[in-house]
Image: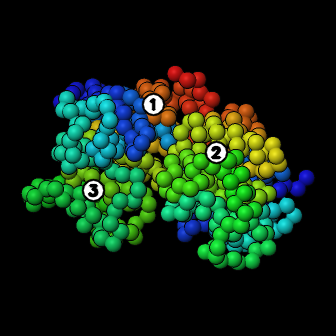
Amino acid sequence: MPAPGEPALVVDGLVSGYGGGDVLHEVSMTVAEGGITCVVGPNGAGKSTLLATISGLLRPRRGSITFRGEPLVGKSPRQILDAGLVHVPQNHSLFRDMTVSENIELGGYIIRDRALIARRRADIEQTFPQVASWSRKKAGALSGGEQRLVEFARCLMLDPALVILDEPSMGLSPKVLRSVFDAVRMMNARGKTILLVEQNARAGLRLSTHGVVMENGRVRLAGTGEQVLGHPEIGALYLGGSPAT
Amino acid sequence: MTALLRAEGVAKAFGGVQALQDCTVEVEQGAIAGLIGPNGSGKTTLFNIMTGYERVDSGDVYLGERKITNQRPQRVFALGIGRTFQLTRIFPRLTVMENMLIAAQHGGGRDGRFRNPLARAGGNAERRRATELLEFTGIASHAGALADTLSYGQRKLLELSYVLVADPAIVLLDEPAGGVNPSLIQHLAGRIRELNAAGKTFLIVEHNMDFVMGLCGHVTVLDYGTVVASGPPAIIRSDPRVLDAYLGATEEDDDAGPG
């Protein structure tokens, strides 16, 4: 296992896309062990495609992805789960008519060991006591922010080493955003390395130890969250007119 | 001067989500105007309201002096507002020409009478007009091909051709450059400029900033369903409120209280 701050996930020269065209053009980036790395960028930059390729939902055309030294390209999404990467997708992914407790249980559907499931559930209740208090409610009855927390709780059933979050702030008010980001910090404090994509670039970068700005399928800026946030070019990357690199 | 198209103080909520709030957007006659804003800022909802696909909760829409609030889409189209959709809406199992002839039957006559689109389509005049438009957009060589054999970018050109059949006073384009390859984007921009030079007014929703900023003389920026800035591209690009809209508010900003 890499030391904290060393690269845990290494993406190198990744080319990936759907159908005819490439969305990612030779993307290289790293995710630091124990850190929170935030990928930002305008619509169509390739952020979600990057996450889908990392978690094996999309097979890259070229390039490599390694996690703690283990190559991931060519593995199935299930094998990538086993390698310790869990992806929380962008869209509401809970079963609305099932209870919170049932939804969380489903996060561990690949686990056969009942005792392990019980242990994981107990851990999750400690991490997110709020979520435990909703356990008998229907997931669809929760607010958008509450559903986010349940999705986080569910992903912890597999005790991932790397949690991948696709736009956790989407559709949330600033106040709710804070509670969701607090939950991200909580997971990070409990040892999870975090990779997230954020549309709210400022909030996402401020939350994170490391930042990556993508634009048009390429990495345009990378550094600490603060460096990226303060970079004079970040506005141009969003509003156009940026000098080509 | 009266704007050609104006949404005035429009509000629209879906359940608990306020998609538009006191939203006023004007498009001058002869303009190529842009409408931008982050995801979920209300751009498509405003388009839907302007074209009758959604009803307002409050506020009004005017075409010139005429109030067209909550008119049905067919009526709005007949009055002279054409639009394309983010995901193209064409008939995939008909040929490109057949798609055009259906457009001719729907919108060609401004009398608003319903005509059966399956009735024998395509008088000579209609075919000639359709061919001219396909030549103009550059897909005439595909006229006999099934629409679903077109590339994504070509479908967008078909949709533009289709909308032009009715010779609308203003054309609303919803993400015309989205998913389209760079050379076709250039081609599309050229066609829009040419139509504009001939007097056509445009309102364009688009995320491709180089496309919007290069094409539009005036850009309006929505954020959380309301207008945060409006002006020429150079001003918009350097407006800190626009940057705030795109880069987002931080958690800390919430502590600053109202404002």
Question: What amino acid is labelled 3 in the image?
Answer: Arg
Identify the residue under disc 2: B138
Evaluate whether residue A200 shows in this view. no
Q: Looking at the picture, how far across and down is residue B256, in whole percent? A: 59, 45
Circle 1 — which element?
strand
> What residue is at 36 percent from the left and 51 percent from the top?
A89
For the residues beneath circles 1 and 2, the answer to whether they share a chain is no
Q: Looking at the picture, how far across and down is residue B212, in whole percent? A: 66, 40
Q: Which mark identifies residue B180?
A: none
Q: Nearer the viewer, residue A22 or A76?
A: A22
Identify the residue under disc 1: A218
Q: Nearer the viewer, residue B156 or B49?
A: B156
> What residue is at 36 percent from the left and 49 percent from the top?
A183
Question: What amino acid is labelled 2 in the image?
Answer: Gly
Evaluate whether residue B100 shows in this view. yes
Q: Looking at the picture, how far across and down is residue A143, in whole percent? A: 43, 64
Graded by Cα atoms within 10 Å as few (under 14), some (14 to 19) or many (20 or more), the crowding at tag 1 reads many
Identify the residue under disc 3: A154
Q: Nearer the viewer, residue B36 or A157?
A: B36
For the residues beneath circles 1 and 3, the answer to whether they share a chain is yes
